[in-house]
Amino acid sequence: MKSKFTIINIVFFFLGIPVGFSQTFNDRNNTVPLSEKLKTIAAKYNQTLLGESTFVFDASMDMKEVQTLIDSIYVGQVYPTNEFSKNRYALLFKPGTYQLDVRVGYYMHIMGLGNSPEDVVIVGAVRSNASKGHVLCNFWRTAENLTIVPTIDSTNTWAVSQAAPLRRVNVKGNLKLHDGASSGGFMADCKIEGTVFSGSQQQWLTRNSVLKKWDGGVWNMMYVGVVNAPQENWPDKPVTTIKETPEVREKPYWIYSAGKYILKIPAIKKNSIGVDWDKPNRGEKSISIDDFYIAKPDADNAKSINIALKKGKHILFTPGIYSLSESLKITSPGTVMMGIGMATLVPEKGNKAIEVSDVDGVTIAGLLIDANIIPSETLMQVGKPGSKKNHSANPTYLFDVFFRVGGPHEGSASRCLVINSNNVCADHVWLWRADHGTGVGWDKNKCANGLIVNGDNVTIYGLFNEHFQEYQTIWNGENGRVYFYQSEMPYDPPTVDAWKHGETLGYASYKVGDDVKNHQAWGVGIYNVFYDAPVIVDQAIETPPAVENGFYHKVIFWLNGNKESIVKSIINGKGGSVNSSNRKATMK
């Protein structure tokens, strides 16, 4: 890739970036040699306790050096060359004020280390922008627990699609969510002191946040527990607004205090509105980093991590890719397993990546799980089949857990995530059978289902689930609740017959089990692109008749593809159809 950079082989070795970059860098007008300079800078800011690809900054450091380091990392993490890069980075900021332009690319995790987002202030930007004119592939990045004071038009740009959450962020200005075509995103526990401009964003979920104003909306914009959320007027406006979040716990966050890293675990809150980080006495629990086993990709494997779990340790995955020859088994109540820097787990031998027993209060956060060429039946399982325990007093929580089948390499599975336990809450998940990348094709990256829920009283805020070869979602448990659903059917069924079952044409995206009596979903968006065949689908949502009225604000959209393809109804043969000439249909 060429722009301000010319091609080389040496310097970025010291940052873990692939070879192929220039020995010269346009350092804010001055071209300077990079080899020794970046080697020195990287060593200065690397935090070996948290892995070779974690960099920790404080406000007393040389901001020119810090900017050089951040710029150099970003250049190796941009679309399209590095969409499936093997590099992972965490950039951590101790409390203080920084003058920086933090550009965020693939597998970059930007994180403040204060008790409040206001303890870490970035004056400049923490931004994700378009590359090649759109942000449809701006995935796998995150920013959390900091304040941004934008200096360009008082506007910070966070133009992303899936798997790119903003959490616990305070923007002292405007927030722009688009920079060309854009498709989907998630924001929680944020305060935006100016206007949010959603522009081309086709769908977006905002939860427990405070806005001054929201401008725009395309197909499916949802607000749960949001101060100053737009008023809904479905379908004239693509807005679903729920005043209070019924029950949630915010994602745990790291702080740096008295020379030590401490994980803060927020308390469960019920019927909540807005942020709570500006309130005292929040009832948070603290876990010292001393209680964690710190996993590193060059030193650890499934055996070493499982030994630590058996000893009662929590697990912190530092940035990198972990090959697992057996499942990581979480058996102790209250275990925390989380990653920084988009840490990635890859099962080697057809095993699961993570297997959780039917126990109370497990937290899994910030992990990316990839299928491998030896197919796994399931990539992650929460609770054994037939789990019956009631965990309502201490639920298990999943935060920002993402799955891929194909894309970085060829891989297959039967399903990505199976939830068997009761009272599980997932707060932002993306399950993706790749539609582009390596090992992509109907007979290559095989996977029937993204999500199967068998447990009762399971809640998901932000379910993104796309391109699987049968039902995207199968929900067999009672009293399930989904707040925001974004799903594309598979692009690549080769024939009509290849994508039918029995007398039913096609597979619905969202399937509620035939025996389920109570299920609810709000803000349900389902889209289709059938490139290879004139596919016909009977319905986008399939449920028992008694459950139909539990789905609120539904939209289906014919995006592109074979001109003879058609989705005949929204739910159970009811609601409008979509095709090349009638591309959108909605239902209350």
Image (cartoon, rainbow, N blue to C red):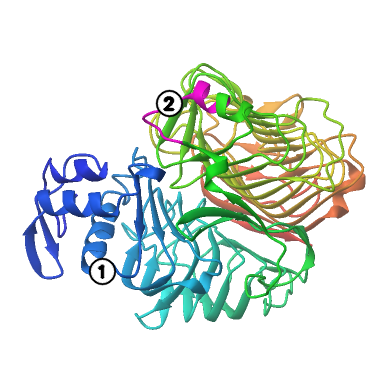
**Residue 410 — which label?**
2
x, y (%) of residue 229? 67, 76
Q: Is residue 201 above or below residue 290?
A: below
Segment tinted magenta in the rendering: 295-306
Q: Label 2: few (<14), some or many (≥20) within 10 Å? A: many
Residue 301 shown in magenta: yes
Q: Image quarter for residue 186?
A: bottom right
Task: Judge from the rendering whether residue 278 lies leftward or rightward of residue 141; answer left or right.
Answer: right
**Badge 1 amino acid:** Met
Indicate the quadrant containing the C terminus: top left, top right, bottom left or bottom right: bottom right
Residue at position x 77%, y 39% in the image: 360
Residue at position x 83%, y 26% in the image: 386
Q: Secondary structure at mark 1?
A: helix
Q: Is residue 454 above or below residue 485?
A: above
Q: Is residue 59 above or below residue 154?
A: above
x, y (%) of residue 162? 52, 52
Residue at position x 85%, y 53% in the image: 550
**Badge 2 amino acid:** Glu
Question: In the depicted view, which residue is nearer to us: 326 or 174?
Answer: 326
How much space separates mark 2 and mark 1, taking CA atoms?
41 Å
Q: Secondary structure at mark 2?
A: loop
Question: In the depicted view, which residue is nearer to us: 399 or 231?
Answer: 399
Residue 477 visible, this angle? yes
Question: In the depicted view, which residue is nearer to us: 233 or 566?
Answer: 233
Q: Label 1: few (<14), some or many (≥20) within 10 Å? A: some
**Residue 470 — which label?**
none
x, y (%) of residue 353? 56, 28
Q: Of callouts 2 and 1, which one flags the residue occurring earlier in the amino acid sequence?
A: 1
* Mark 2 vs 1: CB contact within 8 A: no
**Residue 63 — which label?**
1
Residue 179 shown in magenta: no
x, y (%) of residue 130? 36, 61
